[in-house]
Image (cartoon, rainbow, N blue to C red):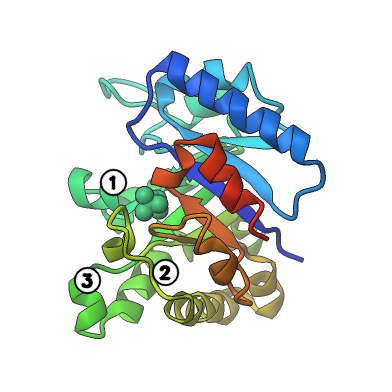
């Protein structure tokens, strides 16, 4: 049966000392909470991975990079590869975030390479997809999501696909304070699960964790997480304070 997961995406926020403090707070709160109904992951800047890994219990709080390079090593100044991420002790990487696609030109093909390299390094992947406001309004959103998933993920074997967590993040809801309604999110989550079932069969689809992301907060998380195909959240702004992040973690 699939796991529930609540994952933070800190984006380009916090200095290393601030990030270490936040990670410690999350780690302590998770330890104090006892049995949780979800796994917890924090996604942090590359610069923070090693220092954060040193202050968390990786068995209780997973650690994600927010990106990795589409090459393994070599003359790619400024890039950070999947093996480098894995060597910090991180166990996840977030790929395909709309900010990476939109601001840094990450195409389906580039993401496909990143997916392969991350899996080769033993990382699990939180793979983001989601439509723009225009695509929502003109009704093409399902086609967009289908292409994002099919062209970057569906070359994988069913065995490899077991390491993929999908995050549905409507771009119009990210950082805007506008959350998709729980019904809108559920409709897309069920659609995504259907796509996975068509490609890999019902068993794999039922085992696939699908997260919602986009202005998720302690106040709206319970309604979202109550939907049958919403298995947790990818949390931006609200993951920057341990209290609000834990308010979402405990929403199950
Ligand atoms: C995100 O960027 O992954 C995200 C969901 O951001 P926010 O929660 O701030 O909308």
Check contact, mark 1 vs mark 3: CB within 8 A. no
Please state, as top left, top right, bottom left or bottom right, where the C terminus lies in the image. bottom right
Q: Which residue is mark 1?
A: 100
In this rendering, is residue 171 above or below 100?
A: below
User: Is label 2 within 8 A of ligand 1 (CB to nearest ligand atom)?
Assistant: no
Q: Nearer the viewer, residue 21 or 38?
A: 21
Q: In the drawing, what numbered circle is on residue 203?
A: none
Query: Decide: marks 3, 2 in contact (CB < 8 A)?
Result: no
Question: Where is residue 242 drawn, in percent x and y?
Answer: 55, 36
Residue 150 numbered mark, or none: 2
Q: Which mark is residue 133?
A: 3
Q: Residue at x 21, y 43 (%)?
A: 104
Label 2: few (<14), some (14–19) or many (≥20) C-alpha neighbours in 10 Å: some
**Residues at marks 1 and 3, CA–CA distance in whole angstroms:** 17 Å
> Does the rendering let one see residue 112?
no
Give the left or right position of residue 106, taking residue 127 as reference: left
The N terminus lies in which quarter of the figure?
A: bottom right
């Amino acid at each position: 049966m699939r796991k529930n997961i609540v994952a933070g995406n800190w984006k380009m926020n916090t200095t290393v000392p601030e990030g270490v403090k936040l990670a410690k707070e999350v780690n302590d709160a998770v330890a104090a909470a006892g049995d949780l109904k979800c796994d917890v992951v924090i996604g942090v800047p590359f610069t923070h991975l090693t220092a954060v890994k040193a202050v968390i219990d990786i068995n209780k709080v997973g650690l994600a990079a927010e990106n990795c390079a589409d090459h393994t090593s070599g003359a790619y100044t400024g890039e950070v590869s999947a093996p480098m991420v894995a060597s910090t002790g991180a166990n996840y990487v977030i790929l395909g975030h709309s900010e990476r696609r939109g601001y840094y030109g990450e195409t389906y093909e580039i993401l496909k390479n990143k997916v392969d390299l991350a899996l080769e390094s033993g990382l699990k992947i939180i793979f983001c997809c989601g439509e723009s406001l225009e695509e929502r309004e003109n009704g093409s959103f399902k086609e967009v999501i289908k292409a994002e998933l099919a062209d970057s993920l569906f070359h994988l074997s069913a065995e490899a696909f077991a390491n993929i967590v999908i995050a549905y993040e409507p771009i119009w809801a990210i950082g805007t304070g506008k959350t998709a309604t729980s019904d809108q999110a559920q409709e897309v989550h069920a659609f995504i699960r259907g796509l996975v079932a068509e490609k890999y069969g019902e068993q794999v689809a039922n085992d696939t964790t699908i997260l919602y992301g986009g202005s998720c907060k302690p106040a709206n998380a319970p309604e979202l997480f109550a939907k049958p195909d919403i298995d947790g959240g990818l949390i931006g702004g609200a993951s920057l304070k341990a209290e609000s992040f834990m308010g979402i973690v405990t929403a199950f």
